[in-house]
Image: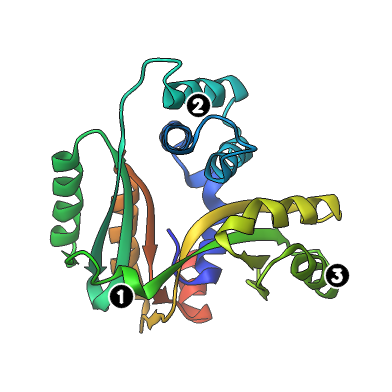
Amino acid sequence: MSGHSKWATIKHKKGAADQKRGKLFAKLIRQVEVAARQGGGDPDMNPTLRTMFQKARDSSVPLDTIERAIKRGTGDLEGVIYESITYEGYAPGGVAMLVEVLTDNRNRSGGDVRTILSKRGGSLAEPGAVAWQFERKGIILVDRKADEDELMLAAIEAGAEDIADDGEAWRVVTPPTDLHTVRTALEEAGFTVESADLTMVAANLVPLPDVGSAKQVLAVIDALEDLDDVQDVFANFDLSDDIIAALEAE
């Protein structure tokens, strides 16, 4: 889930305890497999595979499991053919959403996404109705103990576009093609990278007025993310610090 940056950071910090580990592994392996099928099995020549490979390793997916996924993607091992689909829709309160799916059954995935949205006060949108509001970016979370000035200098020199204080971590924004390069430069400079991933960043955010509306939107996102075929959910909501604190306290 990617919406308000601070909430995304909090979700990352809580992830190890909250994630269903087996389901997370399955999603990461599927992403590796599709990246290898689309761009080849050499991470040095396939930036998307390199990113997905590192993402899987960051989540402690065993190396041999990743290597088998790459071989399925390249055809060296038999595997399922997955199709990449992005569904566009709205959560309650007019929050725009992108739902990225990798599936071997388009009808099943489309039906599952539609059902969750309709049952929880949202709706599917026509292709193009939502996507224009988002832009692909690389996001690197760096340990909050890092010195801001030193991090800024190293990040910008490596090709980053910006850094921001998310409270729980520093958030470094990069062009999507430079994610790996910036991450490598930061690690070589001695910074602790907590995560690095490609995401969709919203141009404008919709403020949610209270805890109740925040829970409605987060419930939709959680239900979507629980689907096996759904790989990522992006939304353009904004949460105030007070609402985040109230949600964390529950």
Q: Where is residue 175 in the image (x, y as percent from the top left)?
A: 59, 64
For the residues bearing labels 1 and 2, Cβ distance under 8 angstroms: no
- Amino acid marked by disc 1: Ser
User: Which sits earlier in the primary sequence, circle 1 or circle 2?
Assistant: 2
Q: Are marks 3 and 1 in contact (CB under 8 Å)?
A: no
Give the mark toward the camera: 3 or 1: 3
Residue at the image position 50 percent from the left and 32 percent from the top = 40
Q: Which residue is drawn at 31% across and 56% down?
A: 99
Residue 30: x percent and y percent? 41, 34
53 relative position to 149: left or right: left
Q: What element does badge 3 sit on?
A: helix
Towards the viewer: 190 or 78:
78
- The residue drawn where x is 29% and y is 43% is 227
Q: Residue at x 37, y 15 (%)?
A: 78
Label 1 crowding class (10 Å Cα cut-off): few <14, some 14-19, many 20+?
Answer: some
The residue wearing badge 2 is 70
Residue picked out by circle 1: 213
Q: In this view, does 28 lie above or below 130?
A: above
Q: Could you give the CA–CA distance between mark 1 and mark 2, rounded to whole angstroms? A: 41 Å
Tell me the kind of residue under disc 3: Glu
Q: Which element is circle 1 on?
A: helix
Q: Reading the chain from its start, which is encountered first: label 2 or label 3?
A: 2
- From the viewer's perspective, tell me whether residue 186 is left or right of residue 62: right
> Tag on residue 150?
3
